[in-house]
Amino acid sequence: MKKKCLLILLVFILVFIPMDVYAADGKSYDFEGYTYDYWGNAVESPAAFQLDRVINEKNMGGIKVQGFNDVVTSGDGRIFLVDTLEGRVDIVNQGGSFVKSLKVIRDANDKIVIDEKSGAQLVLSAPEGAFYQEKDQELFIADTGAERIIVLDGRNYTLKRVIKKPENMAGVSEFKPSKIVVDNTGRIYVVVQSSYEGILELNSDGTFSRYFGVNSPSVNVIDYFWKSISSDRQKEQMKRTFAPAFNNIDLDSDGFVYAVTFDAAAQHMVFRLNSGGKNVLREKGNTSVVGDIHRMKIADQSQFVDIAVQDYGTYAVIDKSKGRIFLYDFDGQLLDAFGSQGKTKGSFQMPTGIAWLGNNLVVADSTLKCAYILTPTDFGEAALLASEKYYYGKWDEALTQFKKILTLNANYEVAYAGIGKNYLMKDEYKKAMYYFKLGNNREFYSKAYNGYRAEVLQSHFGIIAVIFLAFIFLILFTEVRYHKKESGQNEE
């Protein structure tokens, strides 16, 4: 009886009590992952990443942390964490060790900068975002509370210039920069708090250029109907429909601006904006780029607060509503989803930022007052490498990685589709069809089928031509005999 009770208790603990799942090294925390199949069903998958290190007050040199609201990285492995409540940007190295804290801005002579107009010290005021531009090695800080952008030398963190509201700035948006990215030509893209006019684009000298990439709202058919039959006076009294605001942005290696929004009124949640501001995001996967696809209520929708893009087009978006990270390749295929909300090690409560650190991910959480450094698992490393090799056209190397993935997860449709695409690029259409069928990728299956059909027709052209000519001859012969017979009957 005692053994039965102990067995029931053990089963209860394993099933109903959440437990941290550690890797074989006893240090890393493994997440539970999943993807979606063609039919929209969630399919279990190994998680692409695992927790490696935690950055918090313990390894921040004794400074107080109120909560990180954004995270960016540099090519040499530095991590910049924006603490809005403390009015600071904290810098740590790729190992998570404290390097420096930026609050009071200094000049090249290590003297505190004095604002010429106010006569006060130049101090950060509730900054919400930052960006490290590799080409000129400059650190841009969106100093939201002071309505300005601070530009520092990225090597010694001394002041280079201050960008305030441009005199030629159009529109009605206030100049309260929240998130910021800078391309290699010096163009500055700024997400302004609660702006419905789009992303603010500034020239390299800080002058106003334009509003960029307006986020179109979804159309409410009922409202549209009533407005279409209303008078001008009635229309003025109706509630206006504004374009949803963007929440965060990033840049890819080609200079395209990636942006996210969690406004329920928006038509799209993730954007890849070209120079004309048009959304050119690829969505060639079995599901759209929307995070969790089972959402019966608006409150259940994924709410993306940040996006991080790799040089080879793979991007990660973080969902603050469920504490999950969604990993997509350049074609918009969901590679993996993992993470959860909670108080256990590795869980999130209020994730606010995400950034790539090589092939690692750094995730900031404002409520937990920490940042996580996540490293790829064997599955994640293979998935990232396969996406990279495929993106750069290294088909054989990509094929090797996709086959490796299938040894780790035989139900991974993306790998089957990836193998099919590699065979398609090599004009091996029959093999491509086989793998596209396993991956439930109907669009590319049709492409492979068309190629295979053309190949069959070409290889059997002689036989087909003979059969066709014989068929034509038979028709003509039958017609001639019929007409001769008809003529003979008429003569009689």
Image (spheres, rainbow, N blue to C red):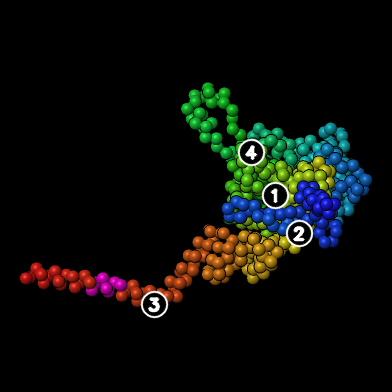
SS state under label 2: strand
| Number of the label disc, if any, that sits on residue 298 | 4
The CA distance from mark 3 to mark 2 is 54 Å
Name the residue at 56% across, 59% down: 441
Which residue is more in the foreground, 197 or 194? 194
Q: Secondary structure at mark 3?
A: helix
Report whether 348 appears left or right of 282. Answer: right
Residue at (47, 71) in percent of width and height: 455
Please state the horizontal and vertical placement of residue 485, each as a whole percent of the image: 14, 71
Asked whether residue 278 appears in the rendered view, the answer is yes
Q: CA distance from mark 2 to mark 1?
A: 16 Å
- Residue that mark 2 sits on: 376
Above or below, comparing residue 66 to residue 484 in the picture: above
Q: Which residues are magenta?
A: 471-477
- Give the amino acid type for the residue marked by disc 2 in the picture: Pro
479 sits left or right of 420 in the view: left
The residue at which mark 1 appears reads as 317
Report the mark closest to the observer, 4 or 3.
4
* Nearer the camera: disc 2 or disc 1: 2
Label 4 environment density (alpha carbons within 10 Å; few <14, some 14–19, many ≥20): few
Which structural element holds mark 1?
strand
| Residue 107 quadrant | top right
